[in-house]
Image: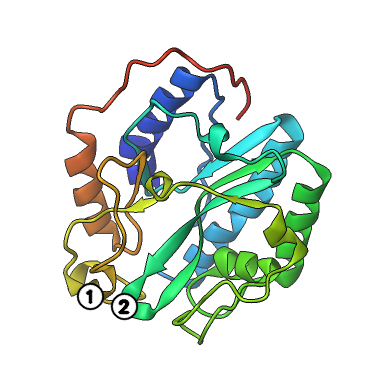
Amino acid sequence: MNAVLHRFALPSFLRYAERWGYAVRAVDLPEDGTGADDGAQQAKWVKVSLLRDALREFDLALWMDADTLIVRTDEDVASHLGAHAFQALTLEQVPFDHRMNPNTGVWLMRSCAISFRFLDAVESAGHQPGPWADQGAVLKVLGWNRGDESYRWASPGRGSRFLQGTSWLPPGWNQPYPSRRADADVYNSTSASYVGRPAVEDPCVLHFMGMKPDARYRQMKEVADKPHHVMGLAPGGHQES
């Protein structure tokens, strides 16, 4: 992930941060992995502690996975955090798996007591079986029905008190990159599982999820090298990260 973070993702984060007055904290992890191996699972889990650190310093914290690109800067993500809510996530819909679930690739949190209690509960839940170390724990704490061992048939379930404090970002804030995938380019799924997913015409964030490193680099480069979509709205007032 280091190469795509510094070459493609981070420049898009910096453009967005300059537009809306956010600070950026890019962290290089000493260890990583591929797919769902132990190194990758450990790297995914670090986002919980990094979010906690950011919430101690700022009023808001926005987590962005290293395989995401911000392709529109005209909208402040904080506008989608409800006054009643301590966090906001997008819902990932996968018709192939009959699955709908929160996706932690883009994760907005407010610095408040319930956010820290939620992160405590996620850490207490620990690594979950399957490919989603952190995301599986988030689903568990939200009271989500996680479906089978591969998360097929995942659905809202009975919910928990934390679910009541969760806002939902528009789908364009965590849009799976819609290009056709070959089976050789993906892990933890098949290319067919990306067919028919809901897509918006002009997303704010593209997420190059589920790709092997060479395919992810190639496709992120293709998008990042295109002229950037920047709308001409007046700057917002957020000074947090």
On residue 192, the disc is 1
The residue shown at (59%, 48%) is 88
Q: Is residue 160 visible?
A: yes
Among the two numbered marks 1 and 2 on one chain, the one whose residue lies closer to the N terminus: 2
Relative image position of residue 63 (x, y in whole percent): 55, 43
Q: Is residue 33 visible?
A: no
Kindly indicate the quadrant of the structure image that contains residue 12: top left
Mark 2: give few (<14), some (14-19) or many (20+) Cα within 10 Å: some
Q: Secondary structure at mark 2?
A: helix
From this view, report whether residue 120 is shown above or below residue 60: below
Badge 1, how many Cα within 10 Å: few under 14, some, many 20+?
Answer: some
Residue type marked 1: Ala
- Where is residue 141 shown, x and y percent of the image? 70, 68
- Relative to residue 152, is residue 186 depicted above or below? above
Q: CA distance from mark 1 to mark 2?
A: 7 Å
As drawn, which residue projects farthest toward the right?
113
Question: Are the residues flagged by discs 1 and 2 in contact, CB closer than 8 Å?
Answer: yes
Residue corresponding to mark 2: 96
**Picture quadrant of residue 156:** bottom right
Q: Residue at x 68, y 70 (%)?
A: 159
Disc 1 or disc 2, which is closer to the eye? 2
Q: Which residue is more in the foreground, 79 or 34? A: 79
Give the side of residue 194 with respect to residue 37, left or right.
left
Find numbered disc 1 in the image and state the secondary structure of the residue it sits on: helix
Q: Which x, y percent locates residue 106?
A: 49, 48
